[in-house]
Amino acid sequence: MKALYCQQNSPGEEVTFVFQERENLPPTRDNDVKVQVRACALSWIDTKLLSEIKLEKELLPVGREISGVVLEVGRKVTFFQPDDEVVGILPLDSEESGLCEVILVHEHYLVRKPEKVCWVEAAGTVRDGVRAYTALHYLSQVSPGKTVLVMDGASPFGTIAIQLAQHRGAKVISTAYSLEDKQYLERLRPPVEGIRQPLVVKLYSAEDESTSKSQLLPHKHDIITLLGVGGHWITREKNLQLDPPDSHTLFLKGATVSFLNDEIWNLSNLQQGKYLSILEDIMEKLSSSIFRPQLDEPIPLYEAKVSMEIVQKNQARKRQVIQF
């Protein structure tokens, strides 16, 4: 069997993606589930984070959001049995590439996939669903009557965040990257309350080299100014620096800044039960059409290398999913 891996020869060097022939799977351990992968979504690989937590290696497995069929279970597995349809996110330290026909996964990283949810939608929604839940439920406690501004609402994450916020009864406004994205947001049901376009909606960072610096980028001061009393700013900008005037403005408003790192669930086993509940709820909302993900057309495995290169350069506007 072949699997896709990420190769980085030296720090700071651009990564490359290679298919490697892998040996037969090791014997199924007590808590392992052997899964025949049916779909795997592609996400940007944070090589810097992996280096910081000492998980860097010459070849990094590619593809962590998977859906598939259970082939075999370890003797201590209690949640699953052969022929169950499952979905989940492989942990950061996984030795398995999701872009492989058959993989071994610990049962605590999987939940059952609803029968009416297709393989591609399950794999393509699970990570953005975790991000949206982390931001809107655990970091900001969105509830009816609140107003939520979702930056880049037509992105895969933005789309799910809008739908979750609306489901929780919040008023949602959004920014759009282009006229096409604005039209997409206008077609969402229920409708987004207000859309502002054009606006690039991420603070500039090293992973956005492909984005033209001449485009309009929001400054942290602009975002802090928009916050209401008791407001929350949820950001994925890991290197955000707040100056004393910024802190003073936040203090006057009683507002907060929280950092969205969707990997926290896999970095602490203490939250495993809560994490699995989130995955189950994401699948339930997908099954009931509360979540309608922003997915590209399914991609065959032989095009995975090219697609991953596009994802790693942040040039994909829709979620890329490989279908087996």
Image (cartoon, grey):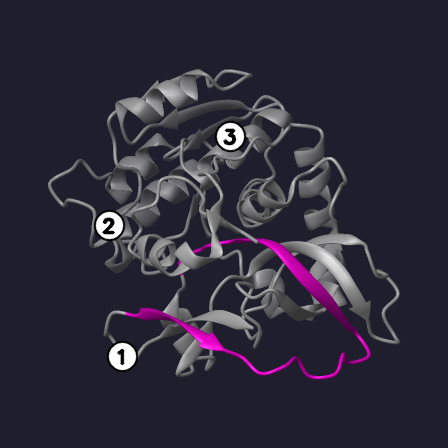
Q: Residue at x 25, y 69 (%)?
A: 14
Which class describes the residues within 10 Å of circle 2: few (<14), some (14-19), or many (20+)?
Answer: some
Stretch in magenta: 15-44
Q: Is residue 76 magenta?
A: no
Q: Does the magenta stretch include residue 42?
A: yes
Instruction: Please give the residue where the numbered disc 2 appears in the rendered image.
Output: 204
Residue 216 left/right relative to 54? left
Residue 199 left/right relative to 165? left
Instruction: Please give the residue where the numbered disc 1 appears in the rendered image.
Output: 11
Which residue is at the front of the view, 253 or 156? 156
Sequence order check, earlier mark of 1 and 3? 1
Q: Where is residue 153 in the image (x, y as percent from the top left)?
A: 41, 31
* Comparing labels 1 and 2, the label whose residue is closer to the camera: 1
Which class describes the residues within 10 Å of circle 1: few (<14), some (14-19), or many (20+)?
Answer: few
Task: Give the residue type at disc 2.
Answer: Tyr
Secondary structure type for disc 1? loop
Task: Give the residue type at disc 3.
Answer: Ile
Please give the label number shown on residue 162. Answer: 3
Residue 228 left/right relative to 244? right
Q: Distance between the residues labelled 1 and 2?
A: 21 Å
